[in-house]
Image (cartoon, rainbow, N blue to C red):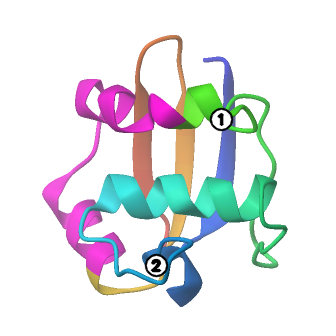
Amino acid sequence: MLDSYTARLSAADHFNSNGARLNSAAAIIRQDRANFYVYGSDDPEDEADAFFDDKANRAKLERMLNRGTFSPSAKRAILNGTPLIHVEIYHDFINVYVNN
C-alpha cells in the first residue's frame, strides 16, 4: 500500500466545478480530491494523501478503482448520500470502503 486516507463525501463533492451533477461514484471521489487539493474546499473529516494531490494521479482514479475493491453497495452509498469513506491506494489500484 502506498497510502490511505479517509474522507467525507459531502454534497459539494457531488458536483463538478461547473456546477453539473456527477453521475458516477468514481467521479464523486475524484471531485472530493480536487476540492481538497485544488479548491481548498475540504470537509472536517477529510484527510490528506500523498498520491491524489497530483492532478495526473487524480486522472487515473477511475481506472485504478476499476481494478480494486469497490462493492455495489459502496457505489450506491456514494451516489445517494454523503458517506465517510476509507481509500487504500496501491501502485495500480485502489480499494474504497464506506465507513458509515
Residue occupying the point 51% across, 88% down? 11
**Left or right of 24 on screen, residue 85:** right
Q: Is residue 21 left or right of residue 52?
A: left
Asked whether 72 falls inside the magenta stretch, the response is yes
Q: Secondary structure at mark 1?
A: helix
Residue matched to label 1: 55
What residue appears at the point 28 percent right and 62 percent down from the top-left corner? 74
Figure check: 90 above or below 88: above
> Can you give x and y, in whole percent of width and height, for residue 38 in the image?
77, 56
**Position of residue 41 in the picture relative to residue 33 (left or right):** right
Residue 37, compared with residue 94, is above or below; it is: below
Indicate the secondary structure of the residue bearing disc 2: loop
Q: Residues within 10 Å of mark 1 (few under 14, many from 20)?
A: some
Q: Amino acid at mark 2?
A: Phe
Mark 1 / mark 2, whichever is N-terminal: 2
> Between residues 36 and 46, which one lies in front from this camera angle?
36
x and y, in percent, of residue 8 in the image: 61, 73
Task: Pinpoint residue 85: horizontal percent, then vertical percent.
Answer: 52, 62
- Which amino acid, by three-letter code, is at mark 1? Lys
Give residue 12's position: percent from left, percent from top: 57, 84
Query: Crowding near pointer 2: few (<14 within 10 Å), some, many (20+)?
Result: some
Q: Quadrant of residue 89?
A: top right
Tag 2 residue: 15
50, above or below 82, in the image: above
- Please state the extent of the stretch shown in magenta in the rendering: 59-79
